[in-house]
Amino acid sequence: MCSPSQGKNMHSALVIGGAGFLGSHVVEQLVNHGEYVVSVFDIQEPNDESRVSGVTYVQGSVVDATSIANVIKELQPLIVLHTASPVHGLPPKIYYEVNETGTQNVISACRAAGVKKLIYTSSTGVVWTGAEFNGVSEDQINFPAKGYDAYHHTKGLGERLILAAEGHDGMQTVIIRPCGMTGERDKQLIWRLAEVYDKKQHRVQIGDNTNLVDYAYAGNVAHAHVLACEKLIADPDLVSGQTFFITNGEPLPQNENTASTSGISVSLSQSHQGSRDKNVCGTFNSASTSTSTPLLLPVYTPQFNRFGWDRCRSNRTRQTFFITNGEPLPQWDFSRMIWKELGDDGNGRVTVIPRFVGLIMASLAEIFCRITGSSTQFTKFSVRYLTGTQWYNIDKADVLGYKPNVSLEEGIKRTVKVCF
């Protein structure tokens, strides 16, 4: 393994988890930025088709303290971006190992190697426990005593470790909290919704669809990471010790044809076209669609409180930043945007299950699983998630210069085009 050499005006960056979904977008944008020599540390290397030209890939796990310490010591990056994260649905033990122990290993390795700049990818979900979040900002909510599942609870534990490391031995940190994402190389969200569509289950809706939620295009979230790199290098006092929410922007109006009644079935009259003529997902290169000319969004104009930020700069401890696409929309509208691209014409009737009925059905499903020793994804929490309001104010991310470049609709089109 050879350490990347820094050219004139070039910065070395190590992306931990850079072969994963979000991490690969971050790597791609850092390379295309033109001012970074990029290395990747991941539990598995990408295949030949998904390898980004000019990037050094090193295989290893953050759970292995010696492995990550040796890599950071040898590469001596100017900045480390810790984007590694297990997928959803794994045993809790894995989340504790990667998100808590692994994060501590990264911090310790940076300290030992004298690396001072560290960006940590968290999640908006670290602060959500089922409450109604209507455009909340970072200073309006605190860490819950326990996260709503092992993934987000341990992501929060990782955040605490990063916040505790800020300022020690000159460590400068930024925490990015993105919402749920889709984009090229998405192997979770887009595939779950495609499975629902294939099984003809997309005509069932739980709740009245009046609850706004945030989703983001992964390319926008990656862009926020690049901006954080720039600020942490050029003006660390401005962003060091901060956490950002990242979304897609302001609320979008509910689709007038969307099922929103509390009755049993309603009619949708939308006329959509789409196709599924591909069955390949996961390949990319430096000319990927995620770096094509972005569709600029006029919908989100930050109303950032500069006076409040000046106060924040003087007392940076435990500050946070959300990153989303800045365009919250009704929960089921998001799903239907994807189903439209998969070929749904929007015609036909939708069975609407009231929230309270969904909670009763989920309770019965959980009881049945406890008796039989089986498992289910249809839980009371999943019903609360589908019917709850959860969108975030991202004004504070204006400090990074962040504005979503690609609309959620355009991001979905790019995703489906590549994945199907």
Image (spheres, rainbow, N blue to C red):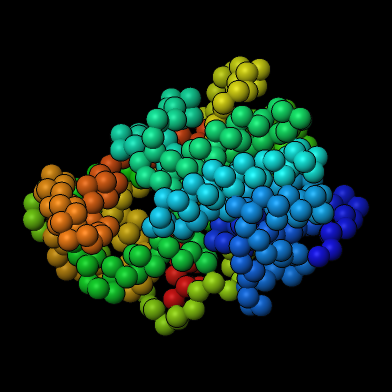
Which image quarter: residue 128?
Answer: top left
In the rendered structure, the answer to whether residue 262 lies left or right of residue 112 reads left
In the rendered structure, the answer to whether residue 74 lies left or right of residue 194 reads right
In the rendered structure, the answer to whether residue 31 lies left or right of residue 181 reads right
Is 284 located above or below residue 252 in the figure?
Answer: below
- The outermost residue toward the bottom is 277
In front: 265, or 163?
Answer: 163
- The outermost residue toward the left is 264
Image quarter hosting the C terminus = bottom left
Image quarter hosting the N terminus = bottom right
x and y percent of residue 403 in the render?
57, 44
x and y percent of residue 405 in the render?
57, 51
Q: Residue at x 87, y 49 (%)?
A: 9
Q: Residue at x 23, y 56 (%)?
A: 378
Is 125 located above or below residue 276 in the figure?
Answer: above
x and y percent of residue 354 in the render?
13, 48
The answer to whether any part of residue 165 appears in the image is yes
In front: 113, or 15?
Answer: 113
In the rendered structure, the answer to whether residue 84 lies left or right of residue 10 reads left
